[in-house]
Image: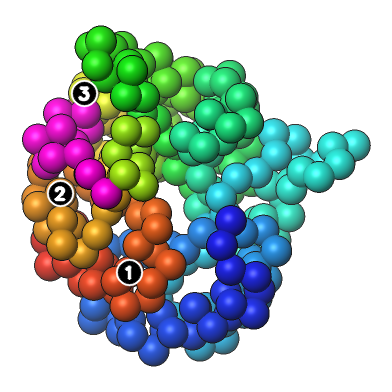
Amino acid sequence: MHFDHLEAIHASRDLGLRLQPADVGPVDVSVHPPFTDLRSVQSVLEGEGIPVALGAQNCAIEDAGAFTGEVSPVMLAKLHVEYVIVGHSERRALFAETDAVVASKLRAVLRNGMTPVCCVGETIDERDIGLTQERLSAQVGAALSAVPAEAVPGLVIAYEPLWAIGSGQPATPEDAQDACAWIRGVVASQVGEDEATQVRIQYGGSVKAANTGELMACPDVDGLLVGGASLDAAEFVEIVRAAARVGR
């Protein structure tokens, strides 16, 4: 919940001045502003040809109806939103979104032609008592049950360990690799090896330019979900460049 629409326009233009197509290379880049900024950011990205896709932070389960305060996925698609985050740890922790709610949002995003970025991850208490794999299996399993097998390769699954988010203490590359490999294994066991190979798995949690290279070098880390560092255009561009140097 950062940047009003004027600040978002400034940040987008700053990003556009710094980020060149050559910086992006083979990676896909998206930004996910608050709902009130989406139209403004869309206009800047498209009007100035910035090589960045537009994303949203959340969406409603239903396409329309008496759901005061919600934002329909249909409305997002009309604004050329390409990616929608579902099940972010803050939505789960602060707004009591269950695995079932996250699954419904996954279906809503896919139904409207956008790509869901499904967040999963464990708390510090779950980690301390050895429940990381069990929690990831439950969250990923619930998400996969919501979509047909043919849609799975197009999903993005983001591993965001709650104990690393905003802490300044990111997971080690070994932590990230172990968790992302486990997630890929869950996909393989529930859907198939081919689908598991194609699905994109991200790591998110205190990501910075300084640790991007080593995180992206992990064989099962296909991308990064960037939090606070994305508010600084210069830092965000350095993260994109570091990811592009890895070449995937």
- Picture coordinates of residue 233 (x, y %)? 38, 75
Kindly report the distance in space between the C-alpha atoms of the residues bearing marks 3 and 1.
28 Å
- Picture coordinates of residue 99 (x, y %)? 53, 20
Give the residue displayed 23% in from the left and 81% down from the top.
22
Give the residue displayed 15% in from the left and 56% down from the top.
211
Q: Amino acid at mark 3?
A: Trp
Q: Amino acid at mark 2?
A: Leu
Residue interval drawn in magenta: 168-181
Q: Which residue is mark 3?
A: 182
Q: Quadrant of the C terminus?
A: bottom left
Query: Quarter of the image holding residue 97?
Result: top right
The answer to if 175 sits in the magenta stretch is yes
Q: Earlier in the sequence, mark 3 or mark 1?
A: 3
- Picture coordinates of residue 159 (x, y %)? 32, 36
For the residues bearing labels 1 and 2, Cβ distance under 8 angstroms: no
Q: Which mark is residue 215?
A: 2
Q: Which mark is residue 236?
A: 1
